[in-house]
Amino acid sequence: MRRAVLIVIPYLWLLALFLIPFVIVLKISLSDVALARPPYMPQLDLSEGWAGIRDFFAALDFENFVFLTTDDLYFKAYLSSLRIAVTATLITLVVGYPIAYGMARAAPEWRPTLLMLVILPFWTSFLIRVYSWMGILSNEGVLNQFLIGLGVIGEPLQILNTNTAVYIGIVYTYLPFMILPIYAALEKMDESLLEAAEDLGASRLSAFWLVTVPLSRSGIVAGCFLVLIPSIGEFVIPSLLGGSDTLMIGKVLWEEFFSNRDWPVASAVAVILLLILIIPIVLFQRSEDKAREAGK
Amino acid sequence: MVNEKSFAPWDDPDARPLIRFERVTKRFGDFTAIDDLTLDIYEREFFALLGPSGCGKTTMMRMLAGFEEPSEGQILLSGRDIAHVPPNKRAVNMMFQSYALFPHLSVWDNIAFGLRREGKPKEQIEARVQEMLRLTRLEKFARRKPHQISGGQRQRVALARSLAKAPKLLLLDEPLGALDRKLREETQFELMDIQEKTGTTFVIVTHDQEEAMTVASRVAVMDEGRIVQVATPDVIYEAPTSVYVADFIGDVNLIRGTARARDAGPAPEPDAAAPEAVDPVPGAAAPLPQPEGRRPQPNAMGKWLHDRVLYRILGRRPDEPRQLPPPEPARAPAQPAPAPAATPEIPPGGIEIRWSEDTPPLIAANGDPALDGKPVVLALRPEKLGIARERPAAANLLQGKVIDIGYLGNISTYHVELPDGTMVKAQITNTRRVSRRDITWEDEVWLSFSPTAGVVLEE
Ligand SMILES: Nc1ncnc2c1ncn2[C@@H]1O[C@H](COP(=O)(O)OP(=O)(O)O)[C@@H](O)[C@H]1O
Ligand SMILES: [Mg+2]
């Protein structure tokens, strides 16, 4: 009985915070845009009884999804989001792995402090932190002034409002999500395994590739998904740091909702985005299960 | 089998050691883990490092494997200083105390790891791995991951992996620590077998003295970063040079007293006067000296049972029970003309040890007369003491009361309290069944030992 209750709690949580909102969005995506409040039709009218419910379901259709295929803007936006997110994830991995490695190899008394430093940025608002990157990256910003002051460059670099700035923003924002799982995996690793590898004739470098990397695989996979999944739908970073040519689906979604007030199309965009995200989430789950099976 | 007479390179002045520690000191911060240590290990040896936890055994292994560098002194491998040779360039492999198997690789791949690093052709690697799997009886588990096999199998994988590259020198750091007794003994013999087959030099770390005695050609006993004694297992056991070694290896009775030189006699045996002289016949030195005529006899119940019931099957009981003659009192075979048993021959020379006001001094014919007047410790192995209820004829006698009897199946240990409170252990092989032994708790008994049964050590 108690176990049943304990199992039910997460499902209730999932139902309330994921499934119900999703069903609502799905319903809107099947509706038609209308000059009304809320701005779509049909509305469910329970006072009509069964007939009302039947009319409601009869009015739903896949028109908006068909519309998404007629304008290649959407397809391009999905593709470009995916490309930006994947690239940014790989950069985050390259930046985050050495940091996690250094932390895991640091003296034990230093580790809590280092962890603290990684988490510290979360104590200020995400929006403010992204804003401050505008101040750093703009033509008159700190970075350009510094580089000009050093004499490295003569002209300010155009970084803000380009994809480069978006990458910087994503890498910066999601770095802790990459570092923490990799750190957790590396910290667990028995250092004598590296000594064993060296003892058997591996150089330091090949010991790293043959032992450290495979053993931190679960951390790498977790970190990559934790960065990839939110960055595909990222909206704030591309709109603040990106340029007019930065095409990301999050931005498109925002435009549809708030500029065009076309809730049904925006919802359709969101549903497709969700379906795209489900693929990596399922893959992630699979690899977690496999890792658990292989563990201990 | 390890004590083949022919194999003793350490006695050969021309033999060149495979490994030489030359005044090696290793410090961690201001803690000295290895203290000015000098040691030679020869090719094909099975060398055991024995010592309590924290005495620096692992540190020595790690210096040999290349994971630590000596703070002072040097380590030579085949005559070459290896201080700056990295671990992956040494013809040395180590079996880690924790096994350190790669958890993401199968048993097969674990064993092949070192071979692959050498860039050998595939067929050769396969053949070698197969050979190792056969040697360690792991063929059935080749495809399993380390977490899918038992502790003992894991240990064998670690062994196979470190052997696969056929290293000149194999380091085993407490390799059998995780095994239960039976598997442990089996594996010890397996190790010796492998060592004989492959001719590899083994250095094994252990804190189990029995293990060291079983497998090793020589044993080094360590204490706080120093080597206290290096010798073959029998010498370590029979002729320890310090109280520490005597106490560390096996059970020992330590009797403290003052030495007094004895009359050297007309023709002192050179053997008996040598300070480290081993009891010439260790096994024969410990018999239970029994007075004439005393034979094992059935008790009243046994007699009744026999005479009333069992005689039909077994026949009449002979008046004189059939049995081996009683063992002769301890005596070195080199000595002339055995005297009648009542007054055992005591070789002249050596020392006597005064250890208590009201008992005669103990005679140690193998003690160094130069110790005259010094405080000494007589180290006596429990199995070299005889125990009897009636006063036997022996050179050395101690009287006491049985406080406790430890029954270990094949042997029994009698804990005897002497009048001054000293506890002495005597170990007797159980040739008779428990119910037929005549000594029991609270019995007043005599402990006896020969004049060469003990080892005299300076305090
Ligand atoms: N890396 C190290 N840093 C500091 N002290 C160490 C280190 N390695 C070993 N020691 C110390 O050296 C001593 C010997 O250790 P070790 O060789 O592991 O002993 P054992 O004989 O039990 O294998 C111990 O007191 C240990 O604390
Ligand atoms: Mg150790």
Image (spheres, helix red, strand yellow):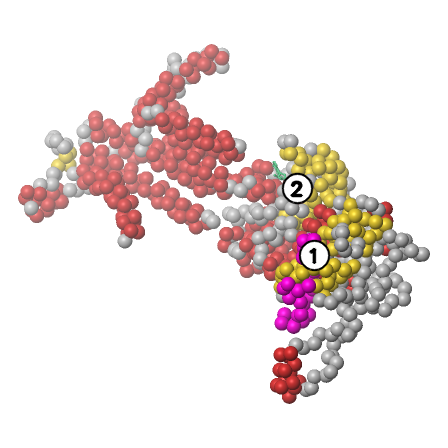
Question: For residue A180, what is the image quadrant?
Answer: top left
**Is B268 in front, or is A196?**
B268
Q: Which residues are magenta?
A: B417-444
Q: Are marks 1 and 2 on the same chain?
A: yes
Distance between the alpha carbons at the discs numbered 1 and 2? 38 Å
Residue depth check, mark 1 versus mark 2: number of the one nearer the observer:
1
Q: Earlier in the sequence, mark 1 or mark 2?
A: 2
Q: Quadrant of residue B194?
A: bottom right
Q: Residues within 10 Å of mark 1 (few under 14, many from 20)?
A: some
Which kind of residue does numbered mark 1 sit on?
A: Leu
Q: Is label 2 within 8 A of ligand 1 (CB to nearest ligand atom)?
A: yes
Disc sitting over residue B418 in the figure: 1
Which residue in the structure is indicated by mark 2?
A: B56
User: Residue A160 vs residue A196: left or right?
Assistant: left
SS for callout 2: loop
Q: Is residue B332 left or right of residue B105?
A: right
Please name the amino acid that badge 2 sits on. Gly
Q: Is residue B418 magenta?
A: yes
What residue is rendered at 57% in x and 47% in y? B98
Residue positioned 50% across, 54% down in the render: B148
Task: Find residue A168 and report its horizontal and vertical position in percent.
Answer: 40, 25
